[in-house]
Image (cartoon, helix red, strand yellow):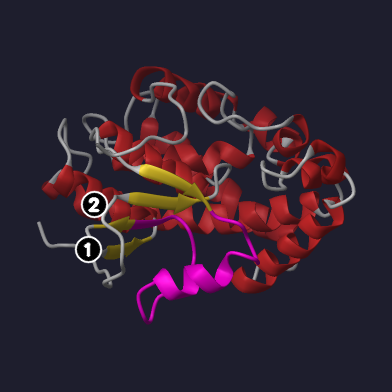
């Protein structure tokens, strides 16, 4: 399998940089964990962590997390990192060669849906002081968190500018999200998997549902304010079967584990 694109950076230990609440980071972690690839996790801090992220990111690639640093090379993005995990690890393949075009199509659909999700979540975060407090770095003392909550608004606005989120979020949900989830329902047709067995297509499709209703805290812990902004009651009532499918997929293929682990 061809090696994913990267650039040389210092540091020998395999390290994943991400946002713990991000569906993109969760896609990456799921693939790494599926293949039993050991890694160290580092939480990215939006805005203040941007200069270092830019330095680590390969030239010509928009700086973003998740970003895997492995053997002195940088591997950007969920799809690239998942392919890297397949090169490194063990277990059943997530990218069977004969199904790569189908997997790529679901990845493209997932990216479109999650771009709308990001816009919706950022807008909700700007209105939720509790979610703002919860989004601050864990190392901040409890007494300072409420005082510094407005700084989270700066980070949210930075994310919106960086990723050029859509202005009319409701229209984007209607035009992009709902048709894609309808196609997912049709493609599954009551089956457990999109292909003949579990694959990355299931992972990337399942993570589209994270902003419909966030997965259980046992897999992806969120504070109550954050969980509220990662929820859409109307979509949840429209697609309960897909949420049930997603939850079953997690129960069968995603063992609850601590976020950070260290490579031997």
**Magenta span: chief secondary structure:** loop
Question: Is residue 53 a member of the stretch shown in magenta?
Answer: yes
Look at the numbered disc 1 and give the secondary structure of its residue.
loop
Q: Eyeballing the image, is 202 above or below 172?
A: above
Q: Eyeballing the image, is 14 above or below 10?
A: above
Q: Eyeballing the image, is 42 above or below 75?
A: above
The residue drawn where x is 58% and y is 50% is: 177
- Check disc 1 and report the residue beneath it: 4
Of residues 84 and 12, the one drawn nearer to the viewer in this rendering: 12
Residue pushed farthest right? 147
- Check disc 2 and report the residue beneath it: 83
**Residue 167 image offset from top left, x and y in percent:** 74, 68
Please state if 224 lies on the left or on the right of 111 as rendered: right
The residue drawn where x is 49% and y is 68% is: 53
* Segment tinted magenta in the rendering: 44-68
Query: Looking at the rendering, in which quadrant would you find the C terminus?
Result: top left
* Cβ atoms under marks 1 and 2 closer than 8 Å: yes
The residue drawn where x is 38% and y is 21% is: 255
Q: Residues within 10 Å of mark 2 (few under 14, many from 20)?
A: many
**Residue 29 image offset from top left, x and y in percent:** 39, 40
Please state if 198 lies on the left or on the right of 60 as rendered: left
């Amino acid at each position: 399998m061809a090696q994913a694109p990267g650039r040389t950076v210092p540091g020998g230990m395999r390290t994943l940089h991400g946002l713990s609440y991000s569906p993109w980071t969760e896609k990456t972690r799921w693939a790494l964990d599926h293949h039993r690839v050991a890694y160290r996790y580092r939480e990215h801090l939006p805005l203040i962590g941007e200069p270092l992220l830019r330095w680590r990111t390969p030239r010509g690639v928009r700086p973003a997390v998740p970003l895997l640093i492995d053997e002195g090379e940088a591997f950007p993005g969920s799809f690239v990192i998942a392919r890297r995990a397949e090169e490194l690890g063990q277990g059943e393949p997530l990218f069977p060669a004969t199904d790569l075009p189908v997997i790529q199509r679901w990845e493209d659909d997932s990216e479109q849906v999650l771009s709308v999700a990001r816009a919706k979540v950022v807008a909700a975060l700007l209105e939720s002081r509790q979610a703002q407090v919860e989004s601050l770095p864990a190392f901040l003392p409890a007494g300072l968190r409420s005082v510094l909550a407005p700084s989270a608004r700066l980070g949210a606005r930075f994310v919106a500018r960086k990723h050029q989120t859509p202005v009319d979020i409701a229209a984007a949900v209607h035009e992009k999200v709902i048709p894609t989830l309808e196609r997912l329902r049709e493609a599954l047709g009551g089956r457990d998997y999109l292909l003949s067995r579990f694959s990355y297509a299931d992972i990337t499709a399942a993570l589209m549902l994270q902003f419909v209703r966030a997965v259980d805290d046992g897999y992806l812990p969120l504070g109550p304010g954050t969980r509220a902004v990662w929820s859409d009651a109307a979509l949840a009532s429209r697609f309960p079967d897909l949420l049930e499918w997603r939850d079953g997929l997690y129960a069968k293929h995603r063992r609850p584990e601590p976020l950070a682990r260290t490579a031997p």
